[in-house]
Every structure is written in structure tokens, then in C-alpha cells.
Amino acid sequence: MAAEWKGKSRGTVLGYKIFIFCIKKLGLSTAYFVLYFVAAYFCFFAKDSTQSSYYYFRKRQHYSKFKSLISVYKSYFIFGQTIIDKIAISSGLQSKFTYDFDGVDSIKEVLKQKKGGILISAHLGNFEIAEHFFGELEEKDFISLLTTDTEHTAIKNYLESVTKKSNIKIILIKEDLSHIFEINAALTRNEIVCITGDRYIKDSKYLTQELLGKEAKFPAGPFLIGSRLQVPVLFVYVLKESRKHYHLYASRSNAKYKDTDTLLKEYTESLEWMLEKYPLQWFNYFDFWNSNKEKE
């Protein structure tokens, strides 16, 4: 298995062009149909991610060997669906999907306090469509996403050319830590800064906490920021529940100022709850538990 996440997802511009052609010219059903073959391809030719996914289902979810193998395929398939859905929604097909909300009032309450907030999510479900859940809110353009700049530039440029511009602002993580000033500026503007808390990058600072019965490394940044900036912290996830239906979950952390350990523990508890409910939608296809030496 890949020992750590390298900060970059797989994919090519050609692959995205094929799916966008299917979505716009042939419909979502055709795009989903193509996924049957794409998911099978990844099962056989994306060795590291397939092994990591199998370990997650077999050892951490305690599935049988057969169910674990089937779940790897299903996970790839649903992951592909979330990408297609994101493109479709961003291309003006939002009305074809339906949405449920659990905890959106928590987000409204945070915005009413006028001091911003930290939103910690995960590579679970389809958070990138979250902005479409917030259309009913009075405040606009209030989400900033903290991220690295390691995704394929060619893919990003192509997607920006064929989809509507997102209202989510991007804050790039920089080695000189200047992104901290951008985060503070966003909070001053009463924005919610979104960070994912489930991908540790090698040689970066980390914290450890048990997840699904085994200790794992989590990036320290999201939890240090969340516990020290004296603003509300929420855990938010957007999960795919059926072919064209999504569900947003938001809950507020009770961790006190500078209590980083409690914040991380609350996060892992919320993540575990989501993984129990939606086990196929955790798209962390790397050796999260550093389990290279653990054999079947």
C-alpha cells in the first residue's frame, strides 16, 4: 500500500471530458453507466488504493473477504458518481437533485455571531457541493476552503472552463504560514473556513487518535487552528443517499479554547458515526492506518 497520501488525486483531462460529454449530451444515466467500467479498471490497475480500500473494509469495518472485495468496487463506483454529480450541479443541473439538512441551524447561528467559524470536514461523501445547500441563507460568499495546491492544474483549468464559477474561496496552505493571516482575515469577514481533518501528509505535524479501533495519524493543523482561534467549530459532511439525493449533517464542537485533544476526539467520534452510516463513501484511498505490515 501507499504509505501516505501524496496530496494529489488520480485522473486525466480526457477522462473528465468524456464524462462531461456524457452528462451534457447523453444524460446522467449514461455517465453513470460508463462508471461500471471505470470502477472495474481502478479495482485492477490502481493497486495501492485498492489494497488500502480493501484493508479498510476487511480490518476496520470487519467485512468478510467477499463483501470487502465487492465494497471496494462499490466505493469506486460511488466516488465516480459524486464527481459526476459535482460537475452536473456546477453545470446548472442542480434542480435535478434533492437535498436534506441536519444541523444547518448550527451554521446559521455561527454566522449570526459575526465572528466567523471553522468547519472541519473529511474526504467523505461530496462536500464540494456544500455551497448548494446554503442558498437559503442571507449571507453570501461566506465559505473559504483551506487546501494545498497539488491537484492537477490542467484538470482544474478545464473544469473551470465548462462549469459555473464556485462561490467558495480558496486559501492555499503555504510553507511560510502566511495562510494563517488569510484565515484570520476570512474570520474577520464572518466567513466559515473549511478544512479537511482526515489526510495527514508525510513530514508534516500530526496528532494521533484511534479511529475504528486502531490508532491513526491526523494532520495537526485543522485541530490547532480550530482550538486556538476562539471561534465556533463545526463538523460538516455531505453524503449521497440515493441516485439524486444528498444529505448534509452539521454539528457543533463543545471543545474548549486550546483543548486540541478534545476537538480531535470529537471529530473522530463524528467521523466514526458517519462511517458506520455511510461506509462506502470514505474516499481516502491511501494507507491511513500505516498498515503495510499487517497481513490478511
Image: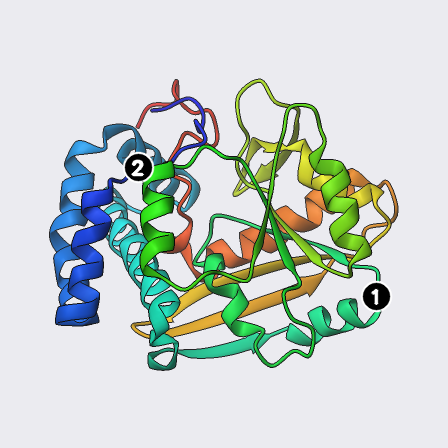
Q: Can residue 87 be seen in this view?
A: yes
Q: Height in image: 270 above or below 96?
A: above
Q: Which amino acid does label 1 sit on?
A: Lys
Q: Which mark is residue 10?
A: 2
Residue at disc 2, secondary structure? loop
* Quarter of the image where one finds residue 155: top left
Question: Closer to the observer: label 1 or label 2?
Answer: 1
Looking at the image, which is closer to me, 152 or 105? 152
Q: Quadrant of the N terminus?
A: top left
Mark 2 neighbour class, 10 Å CA radius: few under 14, some 14 to 19, many 20 or more: few
| Residue in view at x 68 percent, y 35 percent | 221
Q: Distance between the residues labelled 1 and 2?
A: 39 Å
Residue 154 falls left or right of residue 107? left
> Which circle's residue, 1 or 2, is located before the other in the chain?
2
Q: Which three-letter amino acid code belongs to the residue tagged 2? A: Arg
Task: Indicate the position of residue 114 as horizontal and vertical percent values.
Answer: 83, 66
Viewer-proximal residue among 272 and 79? 79
Relative vertical location of residue 287 with respect to residue 182 in this rendering, above or below: above
Q: Quadrant of the C terminus?
A: top left
Percent coordinates x, y for residue 90 in the rendering = 39, 66
Residue at the spot x=77%, y=39% of the render?
181
Q: Specify the label residue 114 is tagged with.
A: 1
